Image: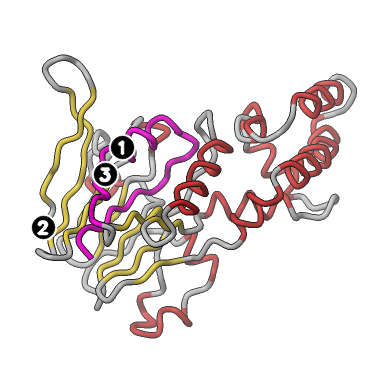
Amino acid sequence: MAIIYAMSDIHGYYTIMENNFKLLDFTDNRTKLILCGDYIDYGPDSCRVLYKIKEWINNNPSQVMAIKGNHETMFLDFLYAEDDDIWNIEWLGADKDFSTVNTFISISSKEQIKQLNLKLGYHEFLISAAKIIKKDILTNHIELIKWLKGLPLYYETETQIFVHAGIDEEAGEYWKYGTSDDYFVSKYPAVLGEFYKDIISGHISTSSLAKDNNFHDVFWDGKSHFYIDGETNISGIIPVLKYDSKTCKYSSFTKGINGYGDSEYLIKRLT
C-alpha cells in the first residue's frame, strides 16, 4: 500500500469535498481514501454528498471506504423513530431551517410542510412534518439509506485505527469488543498519548486541542493520536491527512492562498 488519505466531517460541503478529491493521487491502485464520518448537516448539500461518496465507493471499492459518524447515526435514528418519539422533535428542531432535510425531500413534500406550518403549533408541526419527511426519504432514497445503515464504525490496518470519534483505549488490544457503538461515533473529550496503534479520527474541534481559535488543521499529539478538524462549517476547510506507508510518515493538506488569489493546498509535515 503506497498512500492512505483520510478526511472527516464533510458536513454537507460538496464543493470543498470535490475539490479535495481532485487533489488526491490514485495512480497507484494500492492507494486508499478513508472517510471518517459526519458527511451531513450544516452545509448546503448533505444528500448530494452522500450520493457522491456512495458513487466513489461503488466505482472504487478497494480504494475508497466510509465510516459512520454521529450525525449519520442521529439521522438514521430520526428516520426510524416511532411517530411519538421525542427524537422527532429534537432532531428536526436542531436542523435549522430544515437545511439538511430540504436536500433530501421533494418539492411536493416541502409544500405540504409549508401548509402545516400555517396551521399548527411548533411541537405539533414538527411531529407532523417528521411523518412527511420520513415517508419521502424512505421512499425516494431507500437504497441510499440502506447503504448508510451498513457503513462500518471503524477501519483498521496493521498499524492504524480509523474511526469517527474514538475507541475505548482502556480495553487495549480488545478495543473492538470493549467499545460501544455510541463511543465509536460520539466519544468526547479527546484522549491524548500512547496507544499500540495510531488512532485517526475527526469529530472534535482541533482549535481546542491546539489552544488556537484559528487552527483548523490536523492535530497530532506527538504520540498516537491524529485528529482531523471537525469544524468545516466554521473554517470552510476539510483537512486531508496523508500517510505514506513506505516512509511511515504523516502529513496534512492545509488550505492556503497562492499569489493569484486562487485556493491551493500546501503540505505540512506532521511526523
Along the viewing direction, whichever of 66 and 182 lies nearer the viewer: 66
**Residue 130 location, quadrant:** top right
Query: Which residue is more in the foreground, 123 or 162?
Result: 162
**Mark 2 highlights which residue?**
271
Evaluate if marks 3 and 1 touch, with contact meaning CB atoms under 8 Å apart.
yes
Task: Find out whether the residues at labels 2 and 3 contact each other: C-beta distance under 8 Å.
Answer: no
Q: Residues within 10 Å of mark 2 (few under 14, many from 20)?
A: few
Mark 1 nearby-residue class (10 Å; few <14, some 14–19, many ≥20): few
Q: Which residue is mark 1?
A: 22
Q: Amino acid at mark 3?
A: Leu
Quadrant containing the N terminus in the rendered view = bottom left
Q: Identify the disc placed on residue 24.
A: 3
Q: Nearer the viewer, mark 2 or mark 3?
A: 3
In reply to whether residue 21 is colored magenta, the answer given is yes
Q: Residue at x 26, y 74 (%)?
A: 197
Q: Outermost residue toward the right?
A: 119
* Depicted 109 relative to depicted 261: above or below: below
Q: Is residue 37 left or right of residue 145?
A: left
Label 3, label 1: how many angstroms apart (C-alpha)? 6 Å
Q: Amino acid at mark 2?
A: Thr
Q: How many marks?
A: 3
187 or 175, which lies in front?
175
Measured Cα–Cα span from mark 2 to mark 3 = 20 Å
Q: Range of the magenta residues?
A: 1-28
Quarter assignment of residue 247: bottom left
Q: Residues within 10 Å of mark 3 (few under 14, many from 20)?
A: some
Q: Position of residue 2 (x, y in %)?
A: 20, 61
Percent x, y of residue 233: 42, 33
Considering only order in the chain, which callout, 2 or 1, is on the residue closer to the N terminus?
1
Q: Determine whether the residue tagged by mark 1 lies in a helix, strand or loop.
A: helix
- Above or below, 225 against 137 in this view is below
